[in-house]
Image (spheres, helix red, strand yellow):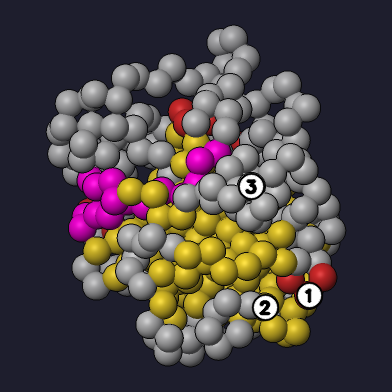
Amino acid sequence: MQKFFFLAVGFGLSTGSALAQAPATPSNAPKVKTAAFRPGELWYDTDGNLINAHGGGVLQVGKTYYWYGEKRAQHQEEGVNVYSSKDLYNWKYEGVALAPATDPQNDIAAGCLMERPKVIYNKKTGKYVMWFHLELKGQGYKAARAGVAVADKPTGPFKYVSSFRPNGNMSRDMGLFVDDDGAAYHIYSARENYDLRLARLSPDYLTATPQDSLLFSKHQEAPALFKTGGKYYLITSGCTGWDPNQASLHVADRPFGPWKPLGDPMTGPNAKLTFGGQSTYVLPVAGKKDAFIFMADRWNPKDLKDSRYLWLPVQFKDGQPTVEWLHHWNLNFFNNPSTKIL
């Protein structure tokens, strides 16, 4: 998301709004295990602290999931956090995966913005590779770069490698996707977010190759790319600053397209505003066929740390992905979709 800080409005700020959010509770909440997802509600880690992993993505390593996301203070950003889980409900805080640099001359010096971090594993190099949208300290959203870091373990610490504009293009909201053949791709918003582009990564996943193509020019951001049944699907949002907007779904037979629009995949209350959220990632659920979780953020610009998470099951109706609002649900949903609310 290109977050224009001169905007004075955002989700959940209007008095009486259906999207209004309660203030964050203290971080000493009771340590209670959960076995359900409750989209939009406060979500605590296993130490009783609020999970702080915004604009993130999830990587599965063996039987463990790792959730990477922006570490947010009330208004500032403080690097990338990582959490681990065996069941997707209960998350253990593993620490800061990538911290801002203390050297003021470093690209990721404290005060920079590291947004939408995603991590993939390179089988050839044995490295965990993180990409993120980087804005340099004191420059607002002028830099529009992709940043790259690597680690030997999924929990890090990650070591910053470099930042750049892929093939000379601006790079803001972004995602990563690894295909069945091991080829990795960087999908990103370019040209002031008017273009959505896809670049194939180098074999070590550390740079973009010249195989870089415009997918479409529709002023879209927040890309979340996934694959099932031999088809590639892409969920994006419009560009309205902090305000929620309508999601879009596209489909293609190949990563570089052509991509066909399928409309809005959301259904239920506030569906036309993506339930007050914005897409960040689509998570495949291990051990379940065609089971995916749509991950989104309900941004709260008055207190970014209190931005909430919307995790909802992806359903397939008439062969097309849809995301229906559920107040609470668990993974048994994928075994029996008719049981929608616990």
Q: Secondary structure at mark 2?
A: strand
Q: Residues within 10 Å of mark 3 (few under 14, many from 20)?
A: few
The amino acid pointed to by label 2 is: Ala
User: Badge 3 is on which residue?
Assistant: 104
Identify the residue at horizontal 69%, vertical 83% (top origin): 209
Q: Position of residue 222 (x, y in %)?
A: 63, 52
Q: Which residues are magenta?
A: 77-94
Q: Is residue 42 magenta?
A: no
Name the residue: 47% across, 75% down: 228
Q: Three-letter amino acid code at disc 3?
A: Pro
Residue 28 shows in the view: yes
Contact check, label 2 and label 1, Cβ < 8 Å: yes
Q: Is residue 84 magenta?
A: yes
Q: Closer to the camera: disc 3 or disc 1?
A: 3
Residue beneath disc 1:
167
Q: Which mark is residue 302?
A: none
**Residue, x 76% and y 27% (percent of image)?**
7
- The residue drawn where x is 55% and y is 88% is 203
Q: CA distance from mark 3 to mark 2?
A: 27 Å
Is residue 333 rendered to the left or right of residue 249? left
Secondary structure mostly seen in the magenta stretch: strand
The answer to whether marks 3 and 1 mark residues whose Cβ atoms lie closer than 8 Å is no
Nearest to N terminus: mark 2 or mark 1: 1
Mark 3 or 2, which is nearer the eye? 3
The mark nearer the N terminus, 3 or 1, is 3
* Label located before the other in sequence (3 or 2): 3
C-alpha gap between disc 3 and disc 1: 27 Å
As drawn, 145 above or below 232: above
Q: Which numbered tag is attached to residue 208? A: 2
